[in-house]
Amino acid sequence: MATRLMSTRLFRSAVTAGIMVAATIPALVPTAASAASAPLAEARIAEHFDLAEGRTPENIAMAPNGDAYVTFAAGRQVARVSRAGAVRVLATLPEPADGGVHTPVMRFPLTTGVVRAHDGTLYFLYATGTADLTGVWRLHPGGRPQRIAALPANGLPNGLALDRRTDTLYITDSVLGTIWKVPASGGTPTAWSTAPELASTGFLGANGLKIHNGAVWATNLDKGTVLRIPMRRHGHAGKVRTEATGLTGIDDFAFTGRGDQLLATLNGPSEVALVQPDGTHSTVLTSVDGLQNPTSVAVRGDRVYVLSAAYLTGEDPNLLLARLDC
């Protein structure tokens, strides 16, 4: 437990310092909720996680039955959270020999992006700053975690998406400003895009990642942007187009099912924004609703799931549920 407590404190220190350097937080004072904010209703905290155990939820993938698969960054874990709120740890990844102190930016090992395949296989990312562990990992139902692709130890793999048509995984690297791709069966990753729009300005660049309507979509935390990169013939990356700006501290996002409309988590400000196809956005959840540095969001039907890691508040990492009315 002492190790996990130290990891959590290091994470808070690293994130706080990085965000301040990047000037991505205009204020840490809670903002007032705008009527639980029209498009979202019935917001409530469904689950509280144990900060002392390193259970800082970083990313989320949904199962058909409504269970959620989450990565606990500071705990080096992948877990399943049932609809009833039961938390079951499925895998704890090995700690690097140096304790992860050479992990870029964060200085400790962390699990980040996660996706679920149709057969229940989980794919997730692990960043350690060491060549033997950093990369893409796979967990078959009932099996043991296995690394299937190595990624650069001097990078920070963060967002993860699965193109089910081609059985290809796409990965954002927040330090190297790169989107990698690798077959879901494993192998050697290739740099799919190194466009300048993906680069950081001092802390973390390319972050959240989704595949939607023939394109790879990504966020850039430092720049507060949502980016769209068309998938050209033979899988090549097209020209990057900036779809939205001014999203301070943007982390992960999810499409609502209404065209290109999406919900985005704003980590530092502790907000969720609704971003319209024309790039305009409005705040739909705030700290008043229980958000504490939200890291990721998922949409399943009219149900919205938001994870908060409490990286800066250090109080209550949690899972918030809300109903989508927009």
Image (cartoon, rainbow, N blue to C red):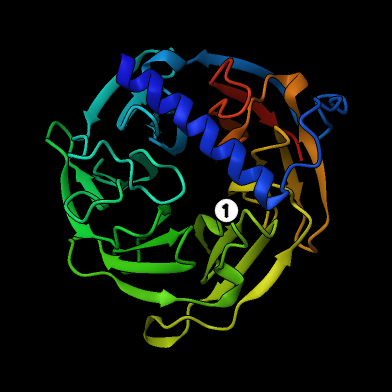
Instruction: Identify the residue shown where x is 53% and y is 83%.
Output: 238
Q: How many marks are shown on the rendered structure?
A: 1
Instruction: Identify the residue shown where x is 68% and y is 37%.
Output: 268
Relative to 66, residue 127 above or below = below
Q: Residue furthest left?
A: 143
Viewer-proximal residue, 300 or 90?
90
Q: Residues within 10 Å of mark 1 (few under 14, many from 20)?
A: many
**Residue 94, image x, y percentages:** 18, 35
Q: Quadrant of the N terminus?
A: top left
**Residue 230, image x, y percentages:** 54, 77
Instruction: Identify the residue shown where x is 81% and y is 42%.
Output: 26
Relative to 257, residue 300 above or below = above
Relative to 303, residue 154 above or below = below
Secondary structure beneath dot 1 equals: loop
Amino acid carrying mark 1 in the image:
Phe
**Residue 276, image x, y percentages:** 77, 55
**In the image, is 204 to the left or to the right of 69?**
right
Viewer-proximal residue, 108 or 88?
108
Query: Taking the image as drawn, is residue 315 in sight?
Result: yes
Residue of label 1: 203
